[in-house]
Image: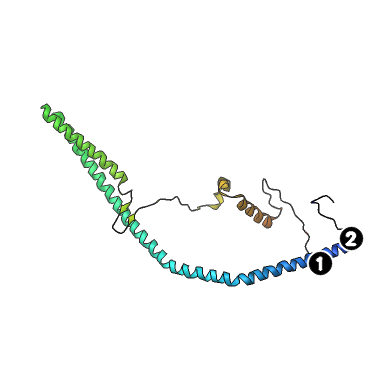
Amino acid sequence: MVEGEKPAIKTDEQREALVTLSLQAAKLIKKVDETRLLTTKPLREEVEETNKFFTAIVDRPTRVKSSFDSMIGDYDSARRDAQRREAAAAARKAEEIAKAKLDEATQVEHSVQSDVVMNEAAAAENFAQKMAALAVTAGSGPVRTEAGTVFSTKTWEFRVTDWAKLDLRELRDSFTSDEIEKAIRKHVRTHKNTKPLAGVTIFQDEKTRLRG
């Protein structure tokens, strides 16, 4: 017999002996598994109860924290909006002042006085630019308080609006091979060979089973 080659049964007696051994092995496997479950049951129950205990402890603080964070977020959002509006208004006012100063400078005949007005116009224009920039970035950074630092984060979220239009091929890179094989296995068990899959060969595998 070639090394690694599965030996062949040649007689009914050999088959009967292997059937007996296989059934004994199945009983042993079942017994060991039952013993494992019985032995680990107290441990699993203890872990489950411990998890429930700590989950109950953190549940209320978690909900309280979430509520407080939302309230703080609403307050800071309104505060940032107000800061942006104030900065935008200041920018508009500074622009108006700068324009008025430029108009005034063109009407002043004395060069020294004209230079003074032009400098005032330039200063107003510079201030207007700063206020315009502040109107965009106001409140965007962290806010340090006596109790702690408040800052906001942004994440991209989603909701599926039409499952029928969802093209899973576009999500191919997001799935592992194991996850894809799990989905294929479920598909095959449900539809057997009545619903083919491109790139997948669906076949019927036959294995010997024993009952004692």
Image position, residue 39 (x, y; %): 63, 71
Q: Quadrant of the C terminus?
A: bottom right
Q: Secondary structure at mark 2?
A: loop
Image position, residue 170 (x, y; %): 56, 45
Q: Is residue 99 above or below residue 194?
A: above
User: Which color scheme does this rendered protein use?
Assistant: rainbow
Q: Which residue is found at the position 30% from the left and 54% from the top?
A: 144
Residue extending farthest front: 3
Q: Residues within 10 Å of mark 1 (few under 14, many from 20)?
A: some
Q: Which residue is found at the position 25% from the left and 42% from the top?
A: 131
Question: Seen in the image, is 6 located left or right of residue 132?
Answer: right
Q: Secondary structure at mark 1?
A: helix
Residue type indicated by callout 2: Thr
Q: Residues within 10 Å of mark 2 (few under 14, many from 20)?
A: few
Viewer-nearest residue: 206 or 101: 206
Identify the mark at residue 20; answer none if there is no mark: 1
Q: Which residue is mark 2?
A: 11
Q: Which residue is found at the position 29% from the left and 53% from the top?
A: 79
Identify the mark at residue 111; answer none if there is no mark: none
Q: Quadrant of residue 67?
A: bottom left
Q: Which residue is found at the position 67% from the left and 68% from the top?
A: 33
> Spatial distance from mark 1 to mark 2, Cα to Cα?
15 Å
Residue extending farthest left: 110
Q: Is residue 211 above or below residue 144?
A: below
| Of the image marks 1 and 2, the number of the one nearer the N terminus | 2
